[in-house]
Image: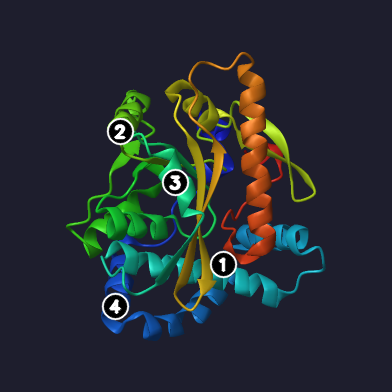
Amino acid sequence: MTQSSLPLWRRQPERGSLRVMIVAARLALLLGQRTARLFLLPACLYFMIVAPKARTASRDYLRRVLERNVTWRDVCRHFLFFGTCLLDRLYFLAGRYDVPDLTVTNEETIIHATRDGKGCLLLSAHFGSFEALLALGRVKHSRAPSLLMYQENARKVQALFRAINPDLELDIIDLGRPDALILAAERIRTGHCVGLLADRDLNGRDLLAMPFLGDDALFPRGPYRLAMALRCPVVMVVGLHQGMGRYEIVFHSLSSALSARPSDPELWVEETMRCYTRNLEQLCRAAPLNWFNYFDFWSKGSR
């Protein structure tokens, strides 16, 4: 696949110097969460200036979800929410799970999905903090979910994580590996939950237009084809950032385990996707500043 044919999010290079990122992260851990947050506003104002595409994408999204004219203060708050979640990510991954306050909604959903000793597929989005779920998994079950993710676009971030916590062991299955799906199936068979962000596509193919915030947006079919192949329960999960170090982990059931391949696979995929996108839209309207896709999400050319 050529570079120009990749989705926009995969063509965007990582920003910032790794050395500067590591120094800033260690300083934030040294100062503590409350003091480190004092630096977020100037940092967000800086990125509002130097990242015009992200600023435009934020304004477009906020206009859709808020259904009103958007001011620069709205965009600044959106950037600030993102910056706060990034900062809190440091404390999650550094092992300071007692820093943010975690609550859980619909926990019975995940308990029911894994009651037979097998795992399930956890579908999330670039919304809130997935790291909050990782922290919850370690605190309550001594084991966090495995993660299916594309690692090529996040080399600096991964190096940063290793620098701030050398003992950090994230169970990551790289989607770039030819045996990624086999590994995911083995994790689920042995009782792991496998997490996957289902709002972006790896290669810009096999997309389906779904109603989302007043317009059609393209979502990938791949996560649902994977669930169908694995015949495992599908659960949606997000970590809502609620401000002041508070996070709410919210679970929604999308599908129970399949006993056999559906008689109409494409219809099953479409119905499960519709359930996911409907829940995601409701979450966006309930907590709009948690949305962190800073590109033109509704443009067919960007996906």
Please tell me the numbered disc located at residue 220. Answer: none
Please tell me the numbered disc located at residue 27. Answer: 4
User: Which amino acid, by three-letter code, is at mark 1?
Assistant: Val
User: Which amino acid, by three-letter code, is at mark 3?
Assistant: Ile
Q: Is residue 125 left or right of residue 155?
A: right
- Tell me the CA gap for discs 1 and 4: 23 Å
Q: Which residue is mark 3?
A: 110
Image coordinates for residue 223, horizontal then vertical, percent: 51, 32
Q: Is residue 251 visible?
A: yes
N-terminal label among 2 and 1: 1
Looking at this view, is 272 or 39 the one in front?
Answer: 272
- Tell me the CA gap for discs 2 and 1: 42 Å
Q: Secondary structure at mark 2?
A: helix
Q: Residues within 10 Å of mark 1 (few under 14, many from 20)?
A: few
Residue contact between numbered discs 4 and 3, judged by CB atoms under 8 Å: no
User: Which amino acid, by three-letter code, is at mark 2?
Assistant: Arg
User: Which amino acid, by three-letter code, is at mark 4?
Assistant: Leu
Q: Secondary structure at mark 4?
A: helix
N-terminal label among 1 and 3: 1
Q: Which residue is mark 1?
A: 50
Q: Nearer the viewer, mark 1 or mark 4?
A: 4
Q: Nearer the viewer, mark 1 or mark 3?
A: 3
- Tell me the CA gap for discs 1 and 3: 41 Å
Residue contact between numbered discs 2 and 4, judged by CB atoms under 8 Å: no
Tell me which residue sits at (17%, 57%) in the image: 167
Looking at this view, is 6 or 262 the one in front?
Answer: 262
In the displayed image of the protein, which residue is found farthest to the top? Answer: 263
Q: Secondary structure at mark 3?
A: helix
Image coordinates for residue 126, horizontal then vertical, percent: 53, 52
N-terminal label among 4 and 3: 4
Q: Which residue is mark 2?
A: 187
